[in-house]
Image: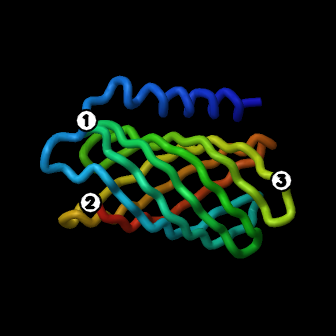
Amino acid sequence: MLTKPVVFLSALLLLAGPCIARSAGPGEHPHHLSLIVGATEKSGKWAETVGVEYTYRLNTRWSVGGWYEQSFGDFDLESLGVLGNLYVTDHFALLLGAGAERNLFDESKYLARIGASYQFHIGSATVAPVGWVDLIEDGKELYFLGLTLGASF
């Protein structure tokens, strides 16, 4: 199954990131808290999704953090996990995460998250179109498109 190797690689990247990174420089705001809003598609069904994401910027290239989300609509779902961002440019980031998702009437399942975002900076505030795919251990996939609205501090 593809999901277990992706979860393992996600965890490895998250553990390796701090080892190869230098700390954020003086004057930078390393903490970032965002509201997540958008829509999730699963097996042809759609759900509105809201959540929160926190990241800590290690340097100009790496940040690590976590998320919590809930989806409501054609299906009810919650997910949480850890993630790492690799900033390819000052604005464009690739994300890789590992976590779990749970339906209201189902047991938890592991997931691997792969995605990208493009941040627009307005002072310490950010707006970022974002998209990702969650690869669930049962072989299903969740697709998300939306925005994060955040602030650095």
Q: Which mark is residue 107?
A: 3
Packing grade of label 3 (10 A; few <14, some 14-19, many >=20) is: few
Name the amino acid, label 3.
Glu
Packing grade of label 2 (10 A; few <14, some 14-19, many >=20) is: few
Quarter of the image for the C terminus: give it: bottom left
In the rendered image, residue 33, in percent from the top left (x then y), is placed at 38, 61
Q: Residue furthest bottom?
A: 73
Task: Look at 34% across and 24% down and name the residue there.
Answer: 20
Q: Is residue 35 above or below residue 131?
A: below
Q: Earlier in the sequence, mark 2 or mark 3?
A: 3
- How much space separates mark 3 and mark 1, taking CA atoms? 39 Å
Q: Please say if the residues under marks 2 and 3 sit with CB atoms less than 8 Å apart.
A: no
- Per the image, label 2 sits on a secondary structure element best described as loop
- Per the image, label 1 sits on a secondary structure element best described as loop
Name the amino acid, label 1.
Ser
Q: Residue furthest left?
A: 27
Quarter of the image for the N terminus: give it: top right
Task: Look at 31% across and 64% down and name the residue there.
Answer: 151
Residue that badge 2 annotates: 153
Place residue 4 in its image quadrant. Answer: top right
Name the amino acid, label 2.
Phe
Task: Look at 66% across and 68% down and name the residue there.
Answer: 71
Discs 3/1, front: 1
- Residue 147 horizontal side relative to residue 57, left or right: right
In the rendered image, residue 10, in percent from the top left (x then y), is placed at 55, 33
Q: Which of the two residues, 76 or 144, is positioned nearer the viewer here?
A: 76
Q: Is residue 15 above or below residue 49?
A: above
Residue that badge 1 annotates: 23
In the rendered image, residue 69, in percent from the top left (x then y), is placed at 59, 63
Q: Is residue 85 above or below residue 33?
A: above
Q: Is residue 95 above or below residue 42?
A: above
